Image: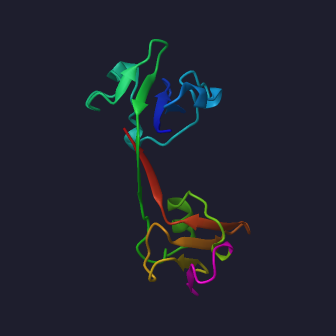
Amino acid sequence: GTCEIRVKINSDGYVAIVYDMQTPADKVSWIDDKSQNFFEVRWDGDIFPNPSNNCGEGLQGKCEVLQKGGCLCQTSVFEEAVFDSMPTTKDAALSMLSIGALDPNTYATNEYTMELSAETGIAAYHSRNGFYDEHTIFELTDDYGRHFFLKNIRSTVEM
């Protein structure tokens, strides 16, 4: 069936995911409209829909005020590449990338080609003609010895 993803936003800007399923039998308690599983998100400019701003005036009816407080909003997800070349430092990669990836070696042989920066120790794995795009995976180890595989992607939820 089809599924629409909406979010409940409480007065502190925390979000709970609400899935509107085509068939009510598909619903489970932790993702239905009664969900209380709120988590913190980063709001652009720290401005978020709440009852005091009529749940985001100017959002063209994508949000509604809830009787018990907070807002219920429709969402859209947009994804874009973060880097169009090798990150200049590990700190730049770690501060701008937050979505993990599988080790590219778990994929089929020749699925990814590796490019290593001798200067930073960062490895970039390309899946398409050597371009830096949303399919690129970066591998690096931070100053504490933690090993990371990070997708070259920024995922933004808009209302």
Looking at the rendered structure, the number of numbered marks drawn on it comes to 0
- Region in magenta: 106-119
Q: For residue 130, say whether it is visible.
A: yes
Q: Viewer-proximal residue, 126 or 93?
A: 126
Q: Quadrant of residue 98 in the image? A: bottom right
Image: 128 above or below 51: below
Q: Is residue 116 magenta?
A: yes
In this rendering, would 98 be left or right of 159? right
Residue 13 location (% of width, % of height): 48, 31
Q: Viewer-proximal residue, 87 or 4?
A: 4
Residue 99 location (% of width, % of height): 56, 57
Colour mode of the rendering? rainbow
Residue at 43%, 24% (x, y): give it.
71
Q: Viewer-proximal residue, 20 or 92?
A: 20
Quarter of the image with the C terminus is top left
In this rendering, would 158 be left or right of 146? left
Residue at 68%, 69% (x, y): give it.
143
Residue 33 location (% of width, % of height): 53, 23
Q: For residue 13, say whether it is visible.
A: no
Determine the main secondary structure of the stretch shown in magenta. loop
